[in-house]
Amino acid sequence: MPVRMNGHEVAKALYAELRETLKELPYTPALRVVRLGDDPASVAYTRLKDKRARELGLDSRLLALPSETSQEELLALIGELNADDAVDGILVQLPLPGHVDAQAVIEAIAPAKDVDGFHPFSVGRLWTDGRALLPCTPAGILRMLDHYGVELAGREAVIVGRSNIVGKPLAALLLARHATVTVAHSRTRDLPTVTRRAEVLVAAVGRPGFVTPEMVRPGAVLVDVGISRVGGKLVGDIDPRAHELSSAFTPVPGGVGPMTVAMLLANTVQAARWRRG
């Protein structure tokens, strides 16, 4: 029987570790979550992040701004948070309204407070094995694979999806763990042949059921990053029928999702420790 990798269980173990760390700190790490507008998904995500941070014992505040907030106003707020020595982590929820340049916003956040791990400085450090705050979803995936004893060194890993948020940073993390990595995408020729090589297969394309059983190598470890709503039900990028072929898989929901939030809070604690000593 394949192993069902439970993100809630792994996140729970990480929260326990973080609580022990927080007991040793003479200060309370502070997180500021910034949201523009009332997009339902963004509202849900930011409220969850703020809730989990407060439950852990962090000083968390959700700063909800009107959707018409200008880019200049948002950058001014980020500047204030950068300058506030009491703030350890800054997260601006994406996507942003069309009139705001998301990359300009990402680059405005001080790298030392970049708990999303999206700043070019953080990305550069990631690819050169330097000290950096890691992107939350890729870091959460590695934490989950470690928790379940999945060996990465020498194994062939295929990532379907090349986004800056998941695909590219995950490739860097897997390479650092000595996996042989292929990043596939919409222009990859004969994609099923490529994915069938994978001993670890990660799907991050946002297309329900995109990875079919025919695309999976028997015994592979399957990591499903996608999440879509189909007929009122949350589904992933990997057809559930493929789970039967795997040695281990992440469910949707309850797999990678909980780890993304947990790693955000771990990054906030780490940022505070690096900044304050």
Image (tube, grey):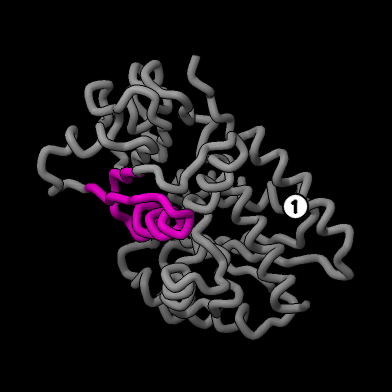
Q: Is residue 273 left or right of residue 164?
A: right
Q: Is residue 90 visible?
A: yes
Q: Closer to the camera, 133 or 42?
A: 133
Q: Residue furthest front?
A: 154
Magenta-colored span: 157-184
Q: Amino acid at mark 1?
A: Arg
Seen in the picture, residue 2 relative to 277 is either above or below; the reply is above
How many numbered marks appear? 1
Could you say whether the residue bearing mark 1 is in a helix, strand or loop?
A: helix
Reply yes or no: does residue 167 show up in magenta. Answer: yes
Reply yes or no: does residue 87 show up in magenta. Answer: no
User: x, y percentage for residue 181?
Assistant: 33, 51
- Determine the residue positioned at 25% across, 32% down: 196
Q: Is residue 13 left or right of residue 255?
A: right
Q: Is residue 119 visible?
A: no
User: x, y percentage for residue 69?
Assistant: 45, 70
- Determine the residue positioned at 13% across, 49% down: 187
Q: Is residue 263 left or right of residue 84?
A: left
Q: Closer to the camera, 69 or 30?
A: 30
User: Residue 191, located in which quarter of the rendered image?
Assistant: top left
User: x, y percentage for residue 178?
Assistant: 44, 54
Q: Closer to the camera, 264 or 144?
A: 144
- Determine the residue positioned at 60% across, 73% down: 113
Q: Is residue 217 left or right of residue 5?
A: left
Tag 1: Cα neighbours inside 10 Å, few (<14), some, or many (≥20)? some
Q: Mark 1 — residue?
A: 54
**Quarter in which the C terminus is drawn:** bottom right
